Image (cartoon, helix red, strand yellow):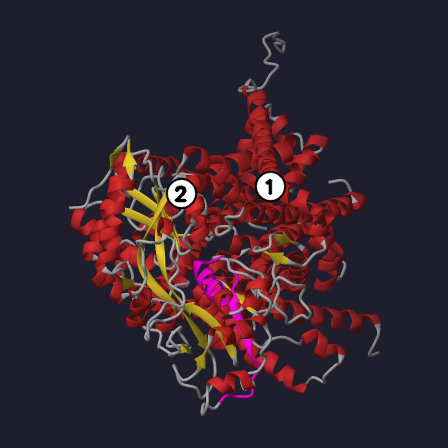
Amino acid sequence: MTDISLNVRTAPRGGWFDPIFRFACLAAATTLLAALAGVVVSLAVGGWPALHRFGLQFFTTTTWNPVTEVYGAAGPIVGTLVTSALALAFALPIALGVSIFLVEFCPRVLAQPIAIAVELLAGIPSIVYGMWGLFVLAPFFALHVQVPLMMNLQEGSIWEKLLSGVPNGANIFTASLILAIMILPYMAAVFRELLLTVPPQVREAAYGIGCTPFEVVGSVSLPYVRTGAVGVVMLGLGRALGETMAVTFIIGNAHGLPKSLFDSGATLASTIANEFTEATGAMHTAALTALGLVLFVITFGVLAIARALLASQQTY
Amino acid sequence: MLFDRRTRRTAANMIFVATCSIATLIALAALGMIMASLLQQGLGGLNADIFTRSTPAPGSQGGLLNAIVGSLLMCALAMVIAVVVGLLAGTWLAEFGGDTPYGHVVRFLNDVLLSAPSILVGLFVYELIVRPLHGFSGFAGAVALALIAAPIVTRTTEDILRLQPNALREAGVALGAARWITIRTIIWRGAGAGLLTGGLLAFARISGETAPLLFTALNNQFFSLNMGKPIASLPVVIFQFALSAYDDWRRLAWAGALLIALAVLFVNIVGRIFAARGTVRP
Amino acid sequence: MLKIIAAAVGAVFLAAGAAEAADLSGAGATFPAPVYAKWAETYKAQTGVGLNYQAIGSGGGIKQIKAKTVDFGASDKPLKLEDLNSAGLYQFPTVMGGVVPVMNLPGVRPGQIHLTGPLLAAIYLGEIKKWNAPQIAAVNKGVPLPNLPITVVHRSDGSGTSFLFTSYLSMKSSAWAAKVGASDSVEWPAGIGGKGNDGVAAFVKQTLGSIGYVEYAYAKQNHATYALVQNRAGQFPAPEAANFAAAAAGANWAKAPGNYLLLLDQPGPQAWPITGATFILVYKNQASAAAGEGVLKFFDWAYKNGDGAAASLDYVALPAAVKMLIRKQWASQITAGGKPVYVSR
């Protein structure tokens, strides 16, 4: 006869630790929240004097005058949005292409080295991107792109308006190029990780019914990782919005609204980096802190839109 | 026959393959150009002195020892903090509260912190630690770096853990294991490679960060192991030396930049060997 | 494996504090950073005392000394007496140098172009747009001025160099003073901004027809095409150490309130018109007598032994008389608990 003992353990061994572990995880998550709250509060408190003084005009004025103490954020805001959008436009297709190539088409032997190579791009410090941009890309761009364009475009045409600028390679376009190269490896690496989590059975099933690799990727892999993919795009965009060092060296740092793609501009982050350590006037410091707050708000807005899009597709 | 469905599909596929290959070539070309510049400018400066002597004044002989040591100390401490916080937070989001309203808030705000410009994080830590304690320190630098790395670790941890099949979790419960044991021995282990990638990405990111260290750890001309005082770091030294007018400083800057790039490559390779031993790749 | 790593990391952190650490810390202007670093290196070799100076910008130096996170601050832009008194600070100069206009003009040798203060202001205001404009040609007879548009390059970051340059322009052009003013960070009416002296130098090097202003060390190291600027005596001196010293020679430090003195447009036939000193800021009432003594001892050592190093890095040392004056000020003004922290012997 089987022994039906009442001495049955009802709780798993070590289960007493479960609530503690759960609490520790919750505490960690809340620590992150607290850190973010701290950053936002310090930005808001620091930037308030400038926002109070200039009001809504702060966002529409392009004046930035430390001597007369009049500050406006329009120039840096436009510069930030344009460079980030352009950078994402350049980087996204390439990151997707690289990761798909590595997962689907690459000969096994080459896959690891190429993956390492792409991740190496991520390891290059942003300072180096700035140095490379200023000393290598800018002169090259000026000589081989801007000068020929200047000589061949008709005066007054749309192209000429869009592509005119001082031929020294320090402009919004080259800054976007550098940014694109910088965010590319993150996006490619995580895209690749995501694509590798597609269950092999599902992929094999698709191949089994005769799909070409294009169709497997398009109809099976990408939809499977769709939500993660949006996260990757957010990673990339976030990095682009806040990148400081590389952009500062090559964007030309002109505070007005850029008049063309090849014109100098400024971003919120580059303005802060350039001026914060030297800003002794209280209003100057407050205006720069307010720029930081604006940058935070823009990032917040971008991410909120992404969340809304995600929610409308499927629950996470 | 030319445009029947079969040919169209094959053609589309060929174009797709070509496009992806070109994209990869572009990425590799960008890497090639930058590495070429790094090697061209930095290789000449790499010698034994780099690892044995501290940063010199212009015109003197020296190396990057204090900067290397300082960076290692701060990045190590920062990664310890970031991995502890990030792993636990990511686990909470993936395993426990990720679908609650609070979980949505935490996830969203984590992404926001992830996108925070590093310079603002540095300023925050300056107000939080440096000003009240009246001094720049390596600890403040490490805290700033940890604040930048932790959201990355959290995000990638959650993404990878969520992609672990539920069957694994159910198997753990079925065997009668406590929840935390299931997580530790099955889920974390199963996701090991992905978690490592997240950690490496975070490490790569913070090892090159300059702006936050400018206001927290400052820099130090001399060799120091004292994390309670200003300490040198490679990115800040590179920043300072690269923008100077002195040839020997510039050479050191490029050499340092090359060092960081090579170190990240090394860490990547080691990480992969580590990960390959632990898991079976599909 | 992890345990070994953890133990190693722990051991390193435990060793911290027992290792060498810089005894004194200072931060501020980028202009004198190389010479301070050189002095600190030699000083440490001779005395074992480490003085860690970091270049975060003149404004940063002022900010940090006010926040008491460093033992001394350094600034290219001197504080006015009222500001010094309200913060309880004292400033003294250490070395001097010049700000030099540099250009990218093919076919023109360094020192061939002559410029005047008003001309520089007009160029930087964007009023003169081409190199062969009549105003420039008038001062440069016989020089082949190309028909190139002028691209103005200025600093994008706040800087003491900009402060000196814009102060000079304000002195020489009422239009500039009214429209832009003098500060380490202004709203430049024209041109593009480079980060740091090197950024400006790089832009000038890459852009045909550009003009920028950099500290003398950068002009020299980059073999840039510099311009001669007319001084008060009507002469066009070359930018070099001897002429910076000439500008400083006539300066009356004794009369300068709180040592606030800009060496702009100084009298003397060879005086370079855009010269300035760089300053150290310390509290009059020192919280720690040891730290105060350490800082002053270092700079006294530099006054006595550092001239050679300064010259090798293209700076100009202070005249001996000025050094004596400063030493007297230390003895009377820097105190801790009522007693002077350092009296130079």
Q: Is residue B72 above or below residue A143?
A: above
Task: Provide residue C90's location: percent of width, then percent of height.
Answer: 35, 44
Q: Nearer the viewer, residue C171 or B64?
A: C171
Would you say residue A52 sits in the magenta stretch?
no
- Give the amino acid type for the residue marked by disc 2 in the picture: Ile
Q: Would residue B276 be found to the left or right of residue A232 on screen?
A: left
Q: Nearer the viewer, residue B93 or C73?
A: C73
Distance CA(mark 2)–CA(mark 1): 22 Å
Assess disc 1: are there few (<14), some (14-19) or many (≥20) residues with their C-alpha within 10 Å of its C-alpha. many
Can see residue B85?
yes
Can see residue A202?
no
Q: Quadrant of the N terminus of chain C?
A: top left
Q: Is residue B112 above or below residue C312?
A: above
Q: What residue would you read off at disc 1?
A: A43
- Give the amino acid type for the residue marked by disc 1 in the picture: Leu
Would you say residue C153 sits in the magenta stretch?
yes
Q: Quadrant of residue A172?
A: bottom right
Q: Nearer the viewer, mark 2 or mark 1?
A: 2
Q: Residue at x 48, y 40 (%)?
A: B126
Task: Provide residue A208's location: percent of width, then percent of height.
Answer: 73, 57
Question: What secondary structure is marked by label 2?
Answer: helix
Q: Chain of mark 2?
A: C
Question: What secondary structure is marked by label 1?
Answer: helix
Q: Would residue A74 be found to the left or right of residue B241 on screen?
A: right
Range drawn in magenta:
C145-169
Q: Residue at x 69, y 54 (%)?
A: A203
Task: Provide residue A94's location: percent of width, then percent of height.
Answer: 63, 64
Q: What residue would you read off at disc 2?
A: C65
Assess disc 2: are there few (<14), some (14-19) or many (≥20) residues with their C-alpha within 10 Å of its C-alpha. many
Q: Nearer the viewer, residue B27 or B257?
A: B257
Q: Chain of mark 1?
A: A
